[in-house]
């Protein structure tokens, strides 16, 4: 039982490049989330998917797109990376919208130069 | 919007002693969840303890316990018999039984031998 997995673990991009961060969970959870964590700060929600087929914006969605590919997978895409998107990105999942508790992946450290 | 405040950016404690981390939050909701997450240098977000607002009894998990004061909107974490492995960032988080976890800014805890 791997829980929540993310790929890649590290990535360096040049300004303007695009990339997709992958996330998968094997806990049969309905809801999935993408957060970013900037140095010395807590996590902030980028996008979430309450259930398969739905996605919604979180606190800081600008510059990102997401796809809920199926119940297991939720990807985050940066179309044109900017230095302000340098951060650590976490994927999380939960049983349902109202369960409260979320389980996190190991994170992806992204640097945009 | 909910806010979560951790007023102690850094704390230290001697091994085997007890330490309390503070957290306050602001909400107009009556039903919600509160969490403490631990983030060691590995970056993994690990759930330490959770508290449901409708439960008056304070949650306890082994050496970790909370002091939940609903009227004061306070949710502190007590770590007893501190161990070197407790060294980490600790984040307080709030969920209004919806989609967003709102995190505090974190407290860096150092356990000294």
Image (tube, coloured by chain):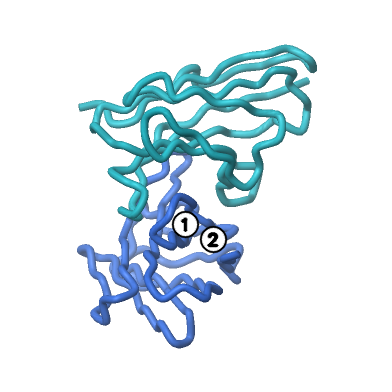
Chain colours: A cyan, B blue
Snapshot quadrant of residue A72: top left
Residue extending furthest toward the front: A53
Q: Which mark is residue A6?
A: none
Q: CA distance from mark 1 to mark 2?
A: 5 Å
Look at the numbered disc 1 and give the secondary structure of its residue: strand
Residue in the foreground of this view, choosing between A9 and A51:
A51
Q: In the rendered view, would you say B58 is above or below B98? A: below
Q: In the rendered view, would you say A85 is above or below B5? A: above
The percent position of residue B67, horizontal first and vertical second, equals: 35, 79
Q: Say few, some or many: other residues with alpha carbon within 10 Å of mark 2 (under 14 / 14 to 19 / 20 or more).
A: many
Residue in the foreground of this view, choosing between A100 and B9:
A100
Q: In the rendered view, would you say A113 is above or below B44? A: above
Q: Are dots 1 and 2 on a single chain?
A: yes
**Mark 1 lies on residue:** B90
Judge whether residue B63 can be spotted in this image. Answer: yes
**Mark 2 lies on residue:** B107
| CB atoms of marks 1 and 2 within 8 Å | yes
Judge whether residue B42 can be spotted in this image. Answer: no
N-terminal-most mark, 1 or 2:
1
Residue in the foreground of this view, choosing between B28 and A15:
B28
Snapshot quadrant of residue A89: top right
Going 49% across and 38% down the picture, which residue do you hit? Answer: A48
Residue in the foreground of this view, choosing between B4 and B6:
B4
The percent position of residue A66, horizontal first and vertical second, equals: 55, 26
- Locate residue B49 relative to residue A22 in the image: left or right: left
Q: Chain of mark 1?
A: B
Snapshot quadrant of residue A14: top right
Q: Say few, some or many: other residues with alpha carbon within 10 Å of mark 1 (under 14 / 14 to 19 / 20 or more).
A: many
Going 59% across and 58% down the picture, which residue do you hit? Answer: B105
Look at the numbered disc 2 and give the secondary structure of its residue: strand
Going 31% across and 62% down the picture, which residue do you hit? Answer: B50
Rendered-image quadrant of the N terminus of chain B: bottom right
């Amino acid at each position: 039982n791997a829980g929540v997995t993310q790929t890649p673990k590290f990535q360096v991009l040049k300004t303007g490049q695009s990339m997709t961060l992958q996330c998968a969970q094997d806990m049969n959870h309905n809801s999935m989330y993408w957060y970013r964590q900037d140095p010395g700060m807590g996590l902030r929600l980028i996008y979430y998917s309450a259930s398969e087929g739905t996605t919604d914006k979180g606190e800081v969605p600008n510059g990102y797109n997401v796809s809920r590919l199926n119940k297991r997978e939720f990807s985050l895409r940066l179309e044109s990376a900017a230095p302000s998107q340098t951060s650590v990105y976490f994927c999380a999942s939960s049983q349902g919208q109202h369960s409260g508790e979320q389980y996190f992946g190991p994170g992806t450290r992204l640097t945009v130069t | 919007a909910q806010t979560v405040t951790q007023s102690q950016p850094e704390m230290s404690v001697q091994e085997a002693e007890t330490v309390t981390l503070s957290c306050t939050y602001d909400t107009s909701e009556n039903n919600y969840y509160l969490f403490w997450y631990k983030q060691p240098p590995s970056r993994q977000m690990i759930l330490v303890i959770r508290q449901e607002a409708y439960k008056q009894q304070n949650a306890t998990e082994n050496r970790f316990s909370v002091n939940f004061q609903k009227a004061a909107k306070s949710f502190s974490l007590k770590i007893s018999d501190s161990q070197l492995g407790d060294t980490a960032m600790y984040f307080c988080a709030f969920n209004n039984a919806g989609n967003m976890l709102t995190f505090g800014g974190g407290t860096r805890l150092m356990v000294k031998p």
